[in-house]
């Protein structure tokens, strides 16, 4: 990340602001505790002892959208749930990201019918899609790391 | 207050009439919304609560936030293809849902299932029961405030997921049971993995019990709340551990044995008081009994075919396709058109981890089911929630929601 | 232990329309207006004692007439046996009395049938939609209600479908 010590042993490092901010954002990206269906169980597995998502600075699941940065849409979104989901997204403070976990959230999955929203990107803008029904915890972690990589690429000119 | 505000509130109050008491309309009690996004509602359950201070006066559940249209979708799919839908209904009990649906299809066409397949079905549904109870125990304890139990439960759960992955290739949505037997025979890694789990797990149950059973905080939070009398439990349609917690000895595995459950010895734990603590004890004991069944099924697992030889309904083995014309025709017919069961209607019950899971299947003689209806335990138990929650503190409500062990996918379908 | 068909036929000769047995399951077809009395009789008569209502399910037999059916799956914990009561209803304005006063377990099942089939249960304490949103148009499980199929996206039709697909903004 370009940390260099130019001032000898004074303990000061210089870094670009972008890098520092992006580093902070990726290392403490708090997901919203928001389980919908089967994928929520795998999301819980990812949080729990074996896969331990806290290795990535994500040990805190915030039930309140006001305190969270990342919305993991874990499961199928019904037409009745869609307005609620959008409201929760609107309540999240910027910067915010959305990860669509699983086939149902990404494209409707096997439920090509009246009750399910055919892809959550109809309601909220999605940054990363994770395939699988449900995705394995490794896949979810891979999706999150992909998102981290993406966040690291963000430039200060984009924030304005 | 201005006239405009008056009219706005009058509209809302009209909607609430009949659901909450008159005191709420006068402003004596408050109406509070809980969910559909709430950490302790186990999914997307929404509750409308009328509170007098901290006491719950009325509780009106609102479900449907996970309505998936599974029943309608299954009418548009062939029998074999619609099995995948059932996994995702009660996603903590995929094998049990497969079993209910496959048993219904087998009953309607009077299809035989080899003993090996029946034993493996019992074995795997019991492992699924343990799996489901582990998630229940972890989340129930987490709701009440015991964080570490969750981590332990999910550690053991991974071992079960590995077993499911060994047999079916998928961790959760296995679709392993098919009409007439299983998708394939279990591979050789299966038996050592299950034996390993059997030797490993009993000590883990002791661990959970050491953490909770005599823990004074746990006792305070669970004893004497969520009381359900035996009469009310039957009248409200409660089944499974919720019914047995009230002392009624009714387990479908014993009363109406299916898939050769009558060959296995196990006890049905019963509660005495019908409160949250009793139901906790029952589910923990059920894990032990399930492990007993798993042990017996594995020890006495017979050799033989893993699916029926009735080629009108069950696809031939892959190896025959190259040599037998007839097998090829059957294969082609089954995977393009599907099979046609006789006209009729059946209702099949199985004991899911939550209670009675019923499958009502109507066939009109075509390759697609005319109507599939699932009687799901979570749906019926949630309808009993207003009765259970009445008069308790709002802090006890999360314990009461946890104790009926709801899965919203199961309730909304 | 009484035979349910005989006991019901002698008690309600006018209400019994048909009975049949399939794979060991007895189905009794009952006139819609008598369903509450028949349920109460099944529950309270000594020798029948169907004390547990497992399930209430709606069926749409479109385009047949009578179009709708409602099946009640009763179970007797005393005698360990089941019985299915079935009620047929006309296609326009299907209506039948609610059995919630006899079996409180039917409460939500009847709401579900009202929601998904549009069958009205008179005397139900709280007949509202349960699964679909309040303002939903139509009753999804009716056979003349479309499944709501969306064209599956392949590489050859990707551009065309993607053009019409709504995407959310910030």
Image: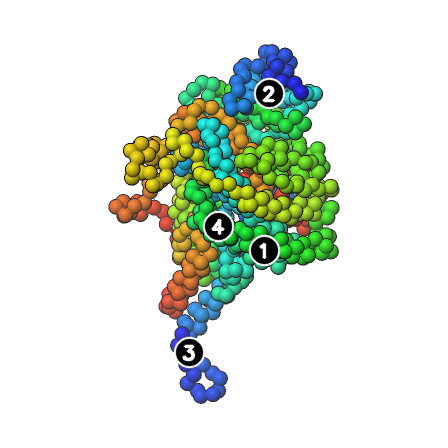
Can the viewer see residue C153?
yes
Depth check, front residue: B102 or C32: B102
Q: Position of residue B9 (x, y in %)?
A: 59, 42
Q: Is residue B270 left or right of residue A95?
A: right
Badge 1 vs badge 4, beta-carbon distance below 8 Å: no
Reading the image, the residue beneath label 2 is C35
Q: Residue A3: which numbered mark, if any?
A: 3
Q: Residue at x 51, y 27 (%)?
A: B346
SS class of the residue under badge 4? helix
Screen quadrant of the N terminus of chain A: bottom left
Q: Residue furthest left?
A: C156
Instruction: Judge the density around disc 4: few (<14), some (14-19), many (≥20) Cα neighbours within 10 Å.
Output: some
**In front: label 2 or label 1:** 1
Q: Is residue A145 left or right of residue B23?
A: left
Q: Position of residue B88 (x, y in %)?
A: 48, 43
Reading the image, the residue beneath label 4 is B190
Reading the image, the residue beneath label 1 is B200
Q: Residue at x 54, y 60 (%)?
A: A49
Screen quadrant of the C terminus of chain A: bottom left
How far apart marks 1 and 3 lie (CA) works out to 48 Å
Q: Position of residue C166 (x, y in %)?
A: 36, 47
Q: Chain of mark 3?
A: A
How far apart marks 4 and 2 lie (CA) works out to 51 Å
Q: Is residue B54 left or right of residue A106?
A: right
Q: Residue at x 57, y 27 (%)?
A: C73
How far apart marks 2 and 1 lie (CA) works out to 53 Å
**In front: label 4 or label 2:** 4
Q: Quadrant of residue C127?
A: top right
Can the viewer see residue C122?
no
């Amino acid at each position: 990340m370009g940390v260099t010590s130019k001032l000898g042993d004074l303990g000061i490092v210089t870094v670009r602001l972008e890098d520092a901010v992006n580093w902070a954002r990726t290392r403490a990206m708090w997901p919203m505790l928001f389980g919908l269906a089967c994928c929520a169980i795998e999301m819980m597995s990812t949080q729990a002892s074996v896969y331990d998502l806290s290795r990535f600075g994500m040990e805190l699941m915030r039930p309140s959208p006001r305190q969270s940065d990342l919305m993991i849409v874990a499961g199928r979104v019904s037409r009745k749930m869609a307005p609620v989901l959008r409201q929760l997204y609107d309540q999240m403070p910027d910067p915010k990201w959305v990860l669509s976990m699983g086939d149902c959230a990404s494209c409707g999955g096997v439920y090509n019918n009246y009750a399910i929203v055919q892809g959550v990107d109809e309601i909220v803008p999605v940054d990363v899609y994770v395939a699988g029904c449900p995705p394995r915890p490794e896949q979810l972690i891979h999706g999150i790391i992909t998102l981290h990589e993406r966040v690291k690429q963000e430039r200060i000119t984009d924030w304005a | 207050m201005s006239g405009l505000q008056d009219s706005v509130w009058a509209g809302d109050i009209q909607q609430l009439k009949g659901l909450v008491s008159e005191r709420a309309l006068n402003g004596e009690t408050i109406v509070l919304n809980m969910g559909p996004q709430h950490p302790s509602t186990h999914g997307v359950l929404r509750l409308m609560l009328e509170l007098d201070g901290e006491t719950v006066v009325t509780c009106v559940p609102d479900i449907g936030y996970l309505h998936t249209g599974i029943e309608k979708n299954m009418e548009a799919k062939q029998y074999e293809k619609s099995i995948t839908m059932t996994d995702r209904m009660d996603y903590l009990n995929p094998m049990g849902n497969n079993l209910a649906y496959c048993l219904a299809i087998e009953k309607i066409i009077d299809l035989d299932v080899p003993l090996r397949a029946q034993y493996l079905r019992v074995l795997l549904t019991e492992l699924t029961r343990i799996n489901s109870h582990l998630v229940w125990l972890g989340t129930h304890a987490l709701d009440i405030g015991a964080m570490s139990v969750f981590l332990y439960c999910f550690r053991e759960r991974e071992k079960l997921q590995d077993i499911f992955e060994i047999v079916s290739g998928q961790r959760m949505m296995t679709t392993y049971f098919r009409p007439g037997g299983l998708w394939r025979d279990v591979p050789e890694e299966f038996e050592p993995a299950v034996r390993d789990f059997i030797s490993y797990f009993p000590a883990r149950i002791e661990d959970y019990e050491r953490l909770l059973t005599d823990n004074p905080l746990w006792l305070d939070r669970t004893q004497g709340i969520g009381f359900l009398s035996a009469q009310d439990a039957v009248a409200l349609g409660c089944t499974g551990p919720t019914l047995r917690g009230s002392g009624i000895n009714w387990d479908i595995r014993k009363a109406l044995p299916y898939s050769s459950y009558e060959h296995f010895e196990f006890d049905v734990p019963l509660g005495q008081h019908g409160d949250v603590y009793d139901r906790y004890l029952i589910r923990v004991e059920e894990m032990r009994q399930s492990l007993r069944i798993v042990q017996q099924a594995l020890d006495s697992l017979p050799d033989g075919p893993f699916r029926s030889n009735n080629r009108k309904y069950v696809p031939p083995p892959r190896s025959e396709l190259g040599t037998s014309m007839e097998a090829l025709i059957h294969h082609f017919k089954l995977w393009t058109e599907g099979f046609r069961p006789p006209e009729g209607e059946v209702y099949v019950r199985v004991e899911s981890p939550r209670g009675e899971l019923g499958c009502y299947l109507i066939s009109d003689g075509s390759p697609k089911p005319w109507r599939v209806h699932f009687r799901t335990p979570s749906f019926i138990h949630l309808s009993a929630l207003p009765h259970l929650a009445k008069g308790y503190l709002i802090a006890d409500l999360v314990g009461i929601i946890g104790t009926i062990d709801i899965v919203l996918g199961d309730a909304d379908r | 232990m009484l035979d349910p068909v005989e006991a019901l036929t002698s008690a309600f000769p006018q209400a019994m329309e048909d009975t049949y047995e399939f794979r060991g399951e007895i189905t009794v077809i009952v006139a819609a207006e008598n369903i509450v009395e028949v349920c109460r009789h099944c529950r309270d008569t000594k020798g029948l004692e169907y004390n547990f209502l497992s399930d209430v399910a709606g069926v749409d037999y479109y385009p047949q007439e009578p179009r709708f059916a409602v099946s009640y799956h009763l179970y007797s914990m005393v005698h360990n046996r089941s019985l299915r009561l079935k009620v047929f209803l006309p296609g326009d304005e299907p209506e039948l009395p609610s059995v919630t006063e006899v079996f409180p377990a039917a409460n939500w099942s009847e709401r579900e049938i009202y929601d998904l089939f549009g069958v009205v249960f008179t005397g139900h304490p709280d007949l509202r939609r349960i699964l679909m949103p309040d303002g939903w148009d139509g009753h999804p499980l009716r056979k003349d209600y479309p499944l709501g199929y969306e064209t599956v996206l392949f590489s050859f039709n990707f551009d065309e479908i993607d053009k019409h697909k709504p995407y959310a903004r910030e």
